[in-house]
Image: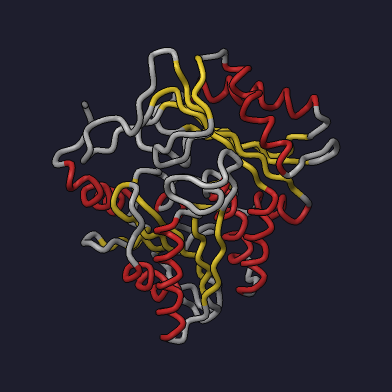
Amino acid sequence: MKKLINDPSKVVDEAVAGIAAAHPELRVIVDPPYVIARGDAPVQGKVGLVSGGGSGHEPLHGGFVGHGMLDAAVPGAVFTSPTPDPIVAATKAVDGGAGVLHIVKNYTGDVLNFETAADLALAEGIEVESVIIDDDVAVQDSLYTAGRRGVAGTLLVEKIAGAAAERGDALAEVAEIARTVNANVRSMGMALAPCTVPHAGEPSFDLGPDEIEIGIGIHGEPGRARIAMEPADAIVDRLLAPILDDLPFASGDRVLLFVNGMGGTPLVELYVVFRRAAEVLASHGIQVARTLVGSYVTSLDMQGCSISVLRLDDALTELWDAPVQTPALRWGR
């Protein structure tokens, strides 16, 4: 195993310190437990947005802290949920008097720890709403979840709900918008090769030289099927078919198409995937109105990709287009 690390047990410590050094516009607690917050937090009168989870999915979540998205992110150890205490600290740090929304991926540890943190914050007089993200169509239950997993659709929820909070929507309204996005986005991923967790030093699962995994999660969990390697177009067709059937999407829909790299996939391959996905959607009469391509919700060094399709209306499109300024996503400002 070759990685650009020093001590495997200090990877998150040193990465958080690097975030703080690279982004002085953020306020970063560089001693555990970690919190990454907007430099201007709390913004008085604005709903605060907090998300988080295990490290290893960068730039999710710390890379999406800033104007128009999250007010704070709470990184845990690699692939391990943060405990309630830093979630409470983040909630208090971004409470500007209008309440705080927790955006939580549907993994058992994340859900339980954010629930506990919300109860503790409520006991201190902070109004908290929580939205659970479960956009993955690959499996109903997994090693980490009861119900569907929260994967790349989380970014879309954070961006759109963040824009609603930035324009001054009330807590209940921001939470409802987040739930609307979650209800209208579907995702599915695949792996050409597994990831290697630094402290484990070996791949998270085994794949033969001519095998791929269809339906993986973002923690290196295996998916719904292991098959022989196929051309890119055939793989895209396999991912899109259950996505389109699940909502279901229909001719005349306007969508945001998001092709996400899992951490070890070059951008040229992601564009090959996007080309085919756009062709398939067009063949179904579905208009790709907004796009995103890149490695935004990763699984360390996993080679592979995921596809997310979000059904848009005018209100969601306006919020997606709204200005955003974070380390990993920025436009219009």
Position of 207 with respect to 288 (left or right) is: left
What is the quadrant of residue 27 in the picture? bottom left
User: For the point 59% across and 34% down, which residue is it?
Assistant: 307
> Is 319 or 281 nearer to us in this picture?
281
Q: How is the image coloured?
A: secondary structure
Residue drawn at the location 57% of the way across and 53% of the way down = 159
Q: Is residue 40 above or below residue 326?
A: below
**Vertical relation: 262 (above or below) 182:** above
Residue 227 pos. (x, y %): 51, 19
**329 and 76: which is toward the camera:** 76
User: Camera-side residue: 299 or 170?
Assistant: 299
Image x and y of residue 157, in percent: 59, 54
Which image quadrant: the N terminus?
Answer: top left
Residue shown at 35%/30% (left/top)? 205
Q: Is residue 289 left or right of residue 166?
A: right
Q: Quadrant of residue 57?
A: top left
* Total number of numbered discs in the rendering: 0
The picture places residue 97, in percent across and down from the top left corner, at 51, 81
In the rendered image, residue 6, in percent from the top left (x then y), is placed at 15, 39
Q: Is residue 247 above or below residue 287?
A: below
Horizontal side of 300 relative to 248 (left or right) equals left
Viewer-side residue, 111 vs 103:
111
Position above or below: 292 against 192: below
Residue at 21% x, 33% y: name it: 201
